[in-house]
Image: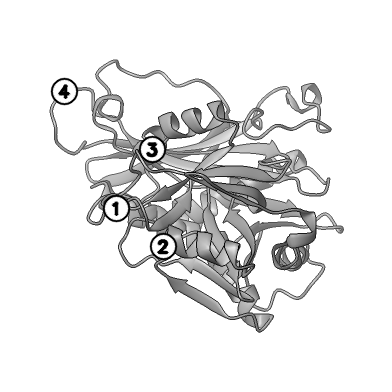
Amino acid sequence: MVAAPDIQVTKVQHSKIKDVDFGHLPFGKFFTDHMLVAKYDNRKWESVEIKPYQSLSLDPSLTALHYGQSIFEGIKAYKDEHGEVFIFRPYDNFKRFNTSAARMNMPEVPEEIFMEGMRELIRIDRDWIPAEKDHSLYIRPFMFATDAMLGVHPSDTYLFIIILSPTGPYYPRPLKIVVEEKYTRAAPGGVGFAKNAGNYGGSLLASTEAQKQGYDQVLWTDAFEHKWLQEVGTMNVFFVIDNKAVTPSLDEGTILDGVTRKSVITILNEMNVPVEERHVHVDELVKAYQEGRLQEVFGTGTAATIASIQTVKYQDHVLEFSEKDWILSMEVKKRLDAIRLHQAPDTHEWMFKV
């Protein structure tokens, strides 16, 4: 554990927590009383503070608005039955955040600001963590360029901010997804592995068109043939074929190295379920379904956790699944939830105590 930085704390005079209906928490709509802000200038991080959640004052020529230097992470905190607060695998997100920063030519955020700043912020706003099943405190660290000038070059100044949002399930019902054959999310050598804002901005048109067809999300494919499966718009994806869990490999740098994905692979190994990380062709998926060998499909992600997939559409092929098929994914979710809520031993030391 690193030493905590000197953090100036200014607390709100009146909490807004009583204005929030904790029985109805759509994802990402409500935010806690405080946020953490750190500034990068003169090649160093400075002015770390926790202050009331508030709007930002931004120059119209802000570099991030024009050239897209903006990255973020998604993390979750939970409260167990004894009222103890834990964050799920934040060191993995911290490392991935700085991997994204390096790819986007941005400065790395020091561990003491990211980890200890997050811990202190959650400690202050811990009453916002919901206790209901499948609820959590969503943590959003992000960084963006703040130079006030035009010109295609890296910024010299940045803001790092953490905000918190009490939330319920991201997907309250099973998903219907369609294989994307027109648009491209990522290509080798690009920024697909980085959690940068542009990846998500570039995906919105495809998901909107999918929703017009009655689907929730797209399943992205490679940039060249649109045949090799990558990830779903908001999460990684697993296919259970012949009692094996198959998930697209990360070797081309086009897929996000999901923290929940890694956790699911670990749990599957403990369940003695074979896991294959490899390239997956859409024709293989259709053939396995037609032959009765594709047993279930599910997504994994911080926001989504474990998301059941009801339908996968590819051209004229519609692959349908029902509740009776979601056996492996629900067992994985059960085990993952038990670890997060301290109802099972945390043998991998995934839970970071606040």
Mark nearest the camera among 4 and 3 is 3
240 relative position to 61: left or right: right
Q: Amino acid at mark 4?
A: Leu
**Observer-nearest residue: 283 or 131?**
283
Residue 302 location (% of width, % of height)? 59, 52
Against 102, residue 128 (above or below) is above
Q: Is tag 1's residue or tag 4's residue first in the polypeptide sequence?
A: 4
Q: Residue at x 41, y 53 (%)?
A: 97
Name the residue tied to disc 4.
150
What type is the residue that disc 2 sits on? His
- Which numbered disc, 2 or 4, marks the residue closer to the eye? 2
Colour pattern of the rendering: one colour
Give the mark, 4 or 3, whose residue is nearer the N terminus: 4
Q: Which mark is residue 225?
A: 1
Residue with the mark numbered 2: 281
Asked whether residue 52 appears in the rendered view, the answer is yes
Disc 3 to disc 2, how far (Cα)?
Answer: 28 Å
In front: 263, or 116? Answer: 263
Q: Which amino acid type corresponds to the residue marked 3 in the rendered image?
A: Ala
In the rendered structure, which amino acid carries the disc numbered 1?
Answer: Glu
Q: With 230 as the anchor, is 29 left or right in this view?
A: right
> Which quadrant of the figure has residue 227?
bottom left
* Above or below, comparing residue 333 to residue 147 in the picture: below
Tag 3 secondary structure: helix
Which one is earlier in the sequence, the residue at label 3 or at label 2? 3
